[in-house]
Image (spheres, grey):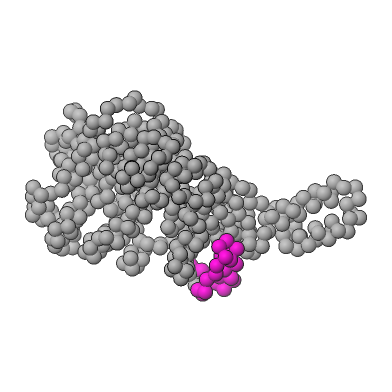
Amino acid sequence: MKRLIAKGLMFGNLIEITSPALIDRYKRAMKHLCGRETALTDFHIDISGYSPEIGAELGDDLYLNPNGANRQFILLTTAQKHAPLLNAKFSTSRGIIRQFIDTNEAQLFALTARDAVAGELQNSVFEISTPAKLLEIRRIMVEADTIGGHVADAGKLAKLIDRFRAEPDGWRDDLLIADMITLARKTGDVTRVPIQLPQMSFEQPNFWTSHFGGVYVFRDVPVPAVISALPRESLGAVPLAPVFDLSLRNQIADWLERNQLAEPIVQARGMDAAAVIRQKMDFILVEAADAMNLDIGDARRTELRKIAHTLGSSLPLEFQGLAALLRWIEAGGTWPRITSEHPAYFYTLRARAHKDRDLVNMLLSDLAPMDVRQMFIVHKELFYASYARWSDRKRQYVADFLEREYVVDKQGARAALFGAEPGMDDRQRPELKPARNLGPIAGPWGKSGGRR
């Protein structure tokens, strides 16, 4: 992983903490949340305040996420909103913390100037011992305060001020006045500078979790479903049907089509489909060459073309399917028939513009794992797990490619692959498509017809 760190592909954009004052605040926040402290004198933190160095020091990557169910957070600066979330157990967690910071940025800026802010993403589930408990998670509440309790004290002071103003003889109540002065020394003048961090609530209908080997839950779609990376039987009984696993390609393809969640990249508006397909083919060739221990040289396209000639009829079916699609795009070749049974099928899709676009692209990455660029962008947990299993030769190729083609223009790369961020009109729930049999889903290029 040192190669990824050096190239800014892992632990990038973390916030460096070296100030003794901030370190002291962090220690007190740790003690407050988990009863533990760090002995480190400098470290980095993510958006939630989690530090990989402290995780390694404690031998516990979940020191701020007990049972992986209720993520706690420590805010030392509002600049954390630009940092990634490491060791994510739920796909929605980073977005919730980011929205909490954005909504309360002015208050948090003032509060973190005095003390660390600590909080928790609370739900009604405190442990996830069975897959069925995942379906009990529907709403996330965010509560936070400084370690010194400034927000709570400000609330108490505001009530005392109201009482002082309401009671005719309030100015004679020495005990009331003394209490007000004591709290005001800590909070300041809350009549001029109110201190508030209102409790925020977030619905969580659709999400991915790393629990139980990786599970997708889609409830807020016309046809709800649960999709498991492991065999579906391993989930046992869950209160939502149908339940798929990644081996059920026909059923997942049908489900995506009925919910109108994905679109063919050859029909995607404003997308250079030929360039994207060609790059996917390169990734597949690198995987095939690495599996057969073939020398890929510097992995330039000319070198990879030689690999393709060497493999000949042994080329992966994923490569052959994408090559047929590329011939149709560029040279008017034969209309390719790529059904959901074909290994190339999910490489030809991307999520439509809707509120769960990133989640669907994440699912497609699980179904098309040789597209390492998409995997790195939308599913880093899967990417890092896969990277650990690759040969050093493939690791070097992928790291060099991502540094050269993605890191230099992250926003541009995302827009080129997945389109612009969905607008409000795109976020509306799609209409339900009628049920169909679960034979192979042909897709728009599995039907006879002209260009689209």
Residue at 35% x, 41% y is: 227
Which residue appears farthest toward the top when viewing the image?
434
Residue drawn where x is 42% and y is 39% of the image: 238
**Which x, y percent locates residue 336?**
16, 35
Q: Which residues are magenta?
A: 16-41
Location of the N terminus by quadrant is bottom left
Asked whether the viewer can see residue 326, the reply is: no
Residue at x-position 42% and y-position 45%: 131
In magenta segment, residue 31:
yes
> Residue 252, image x and y in percent?
30, 37
Q: Position of residue 67 (x, y in %)?
A: 48, 55
Front residue of 278 and 70: 70
Against 164, residue 74 (above or below) is below
Residue 383: image x %, image y %? Answer: 32, 55
Relative to residue 342, is residue 112 depicted above or below? below
Quadrant of the rendering where the C terminus is positioned: top left
Q: Is residue 200 above or below residue 73?
A: above
Residue 191 in magenta stretch: no
Residue toward you, 24 or 300? 24
Instruction: Report which quarter residue 23 is drawn in.
Output: bottom right
